[in-house]
Image (spheres, rainbow, N blue to C red):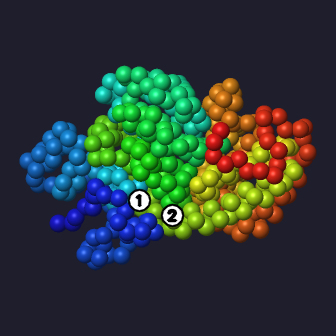
C-alpha cells in the first residue's frame, strides 16, 4: 500500500535548506518516482465500507488525519498532505493544515475558537487589509479589541480565543517582539501571521506563538500562480482545524498543493537572494531626496515600503519593469499603493491609526538585477514629481525605519 507522509512532532533536524528540498518527499525513492505524484482524485474507490466507516468515526471523534487510504477529497489528499508535512517541518511544528487561501486559513482559526465559545479576538494593527476587515466587520461572529502590544494583557477577557499579530506587518513592515507578546498572552493562543518573514527568517513557535498563519499565495508558492493558505500549529489545534475544514470545505486544490510543495524547495534561495536586493534598494531609497521615509525590517526580507514626497499614484503609473500589482512574494518585483488596494477595505481612520500613510508604497522585491530595478524606480520617482512637502508624519530621507512603530 502507498504510504502517506504525515507531519512529525519535531522541529527541523537538518538545515532548513535541506528540509525545504526533502521534507514531504521521503518516500519518493521507495515509490520509484522522482517528481511528487499529483493525485487529483475527488473520491477513492473501496470495497471495504466497514473500514471507511471506522475511519470516518475516528475522524469525527478526534480530527486526527485518517490512517490508510483516503476516502474523499474534502477530508484528505495525499499531495496536499505532503505540502503540510513539509511546511510543518520548516516551521518546527507538530502539524500543518492547508486551506484554499490565506483568508480561508484565518477563517478556520476563528471558527475553531468560536466553536469553543471563545469568540473574542485581541489584535494589533496593522494587519493585512482583509484580515483587519474580517475582524472589524465581525463577519464570522467574532468581536475584536484592537490594541498595541503593551495593551494585550489588559485586553484579554475570559472569552478571548486568540491574540493575532503580524510581524513584519503588512504593509508598514512594523515589527514587534514576538517573545514579549507571547508572554503577555498568558494561556490565550498567539496567532502570528508569518507570511512576510517565512520560516527562512523567523519561526514564531520558537518565540512562543501557538499558531502560525501563512498566505501561501505569497512566498511559499513564490511564482504568482497559486492561491493557498496554511496554518502550522500543534496537533491538538490541527485536529480542530481539520474538522472545521471538512465541514466548511475551504480545502486546497491538489494542484495547488503540488505547486506549493515545489515552491518550498526554492524558498530559502529565493528569499535570501531577494533580501539582498531589497536591502540594497532600501538603502538607495533612504538616501534619495524624492523619498520621505523608508521602512525595512530589522530581520531583513524582500519587502520594502516607502513614502514618496511626490504623488504615489504616478509611481504606479510610471513603472515599466516592476509589475504594478497587489500581492507579493513572486519572482518578479511588484509594487502597489496600500491605501488604494491591499488596505482599501480598511477605513481611512483605521489605516491612519495603523500607520498606513496615503503616501506609502509597498514593494515586493523579486529576483531581477538590482541595477535594472533601480533604473526603473529612479525613472518612476522622477515621474512622481516634487509634490507638496510630506505630511502624515513622514520622516526625512537619509534613514531607514526598522521595526518599531
Ligand atoms: C495576502 C495576505 C493574506 C491573505 O492571503 P490570501 O491567500 O490572499 O487569502 C493574509 N495575510 C497576509 C500578511 C497577506 O499578505
Kindly check if marks 1 and 2 are in contact, taking CB atoms under 8 A apart as contact.
yes
* Quadrant (top left, top right, bottom left, bottom right) of the N terminus: bottom left
Helix or strand or loop: what does disc 2 sit on? helix
Rendered image quadrant of residue 41: bottom left
Tag 2 residue: 267
Where is the C terminus found, in terms of image quarters? Answer: top right
Horizontally, is 182 left or right of 341 in the view? Answer: left
| Image coords of residue 47 (percent x, y) | 11, 54
270 vs 174, nearest the viewer: 174
| Left or right: 168 in relation to 401 | left
Query: Residue at point 36% right, 26% down?
Result: 118
**Camera-nearest residue between 35 and 337:** 337
Among numbered discs 1 and 2, the one appearing first in the sequence: 1
Residue 207 % position (x, y): 44, 48
Choose mark 1 or mark 2, whichever is in front: 1
What residue does disc 1 label?
90
Look at the numbered disc 1 and say if its residue's Cβ is closer than 8 Å to ligand 1: no
Q: Position of residue 122 (x, y in %)?
A: 48, 29
Q: Residue at x 15, y 55 (%)?
A: 46
Establish if 177 lies above or below 300: above
Q: Is any part of residue 42 visible from this angle?
A: no
Amino acid at each position: 500500500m502507498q504510504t502517506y507522509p504525515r507531519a512529525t512532532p519535531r522541529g527541523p533536524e537538518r538545515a532548513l535548506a535541506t528540509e525545504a528540498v526533502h521534507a514531504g518527499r521521503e518516500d519518493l525513492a521507495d515509490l520509484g518516482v522522482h517528481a511528487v505524484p499529483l493525485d487529483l482524485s475527488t473520491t477513492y474507490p473501496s470495497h471495504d465500507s466497514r473500514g471507511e466507516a471506522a475511519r470516518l468515526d475516528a475522524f469525527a471523534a478526534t480530527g486526527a488525519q485518517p490512517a490508510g487510504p483516503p476516502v474523499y477529497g474534502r477530508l484528505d489528499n495525499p499531495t496536499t498532505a505532503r505540502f503540510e508535512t513539509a511546511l510543518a517541518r520548516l516551521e518546527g511544528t507538530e502539524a500543518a493544515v492547508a486551506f484554499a487561501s490565506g483568508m480561508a486559513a484565518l477563517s478556520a482559526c476563528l471558527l475553531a475558537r468560536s466553536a469553543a465559545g471563545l469568540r473574542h479576538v485581541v489584535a494589533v494593527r496593522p494587519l493585512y487589509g482583509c484580515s483587519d476587515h474580517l475582524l472589524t466587520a465581525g463577519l464570522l461572529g467574532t468581536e475584536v479589541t484592537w490594541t498595541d502590544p503593551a495593551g494585550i494583557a489588559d485586553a484579554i477577557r475570559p472569552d478571548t480565543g486568540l491574540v493575532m499579530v503580524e510581524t513584519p506587518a503588512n504593509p508598514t513592515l512594523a515589527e514587534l517582539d514576538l517573545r514579549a507578546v507571547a508572554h503577555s498572552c498568558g494561556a490565550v493562543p498567539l496567532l502570528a501571521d508569518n507570511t512576510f518573514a517565512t520560516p527562512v527568517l523567523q519561526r514564531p513557535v520558537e518565540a512562543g506563538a501557538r499558531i502560525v498563519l501563512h498566505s501561501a499565495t505569497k512566498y511559499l508558492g513564490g511564482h504568482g500562480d497559486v492561491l493557498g493558505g496554511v496554518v502550522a500549529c500543534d496537533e491538538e489545534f490541527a485536529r480542530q482545524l481539520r474538522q472545521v475544514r471538512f465541514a466548511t470545505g475551504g480545502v486546497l486544490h491538489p494542484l495547488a498543493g503540488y505547486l506549493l510543495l515545489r515552491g518550498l524547495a526554492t524558498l530559502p534561495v529565493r528569499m535570501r537572494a531577494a533580501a539582498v536586493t531589497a536591502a540594497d534598494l532600501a538603502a538607495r531609497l533612504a538616501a534619495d531626496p524624492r523619498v520621505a521615509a523608508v521602512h525595512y525590517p530589522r530581520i531583513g526580507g524582500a519587502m520594502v515600503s516607502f513614502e514618496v514626497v511626490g504623488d504615489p499614484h504616478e509611481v504606479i503609473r510610471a513603472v515599466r519593469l516592476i509589475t504594478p500589482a497587489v500581492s507579493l512574494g513572486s519572482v518578479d518585483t511588484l509594487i502597489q499603493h496600500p491605501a488604494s488596494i491591499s488596505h482599501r477595505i480598511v477605513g481611512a481612520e483605521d489605516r491612519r491609526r495603523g500607520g498606513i500613510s496615503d503616501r506609502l508604497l509597498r514593494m515586493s522585491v523579486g529576483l531581477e538585477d538590482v541595477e535594472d530595478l533601480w533604473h526603473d524606480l529612479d525613472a518612476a520617482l522622477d515621474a512622481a514629481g516634487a509634490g507638496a512637502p510630506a505630511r502624515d508624519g513622514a520622516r526625512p530621507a537619509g534613514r531607514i525605519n526598522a521595526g518599531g512603530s
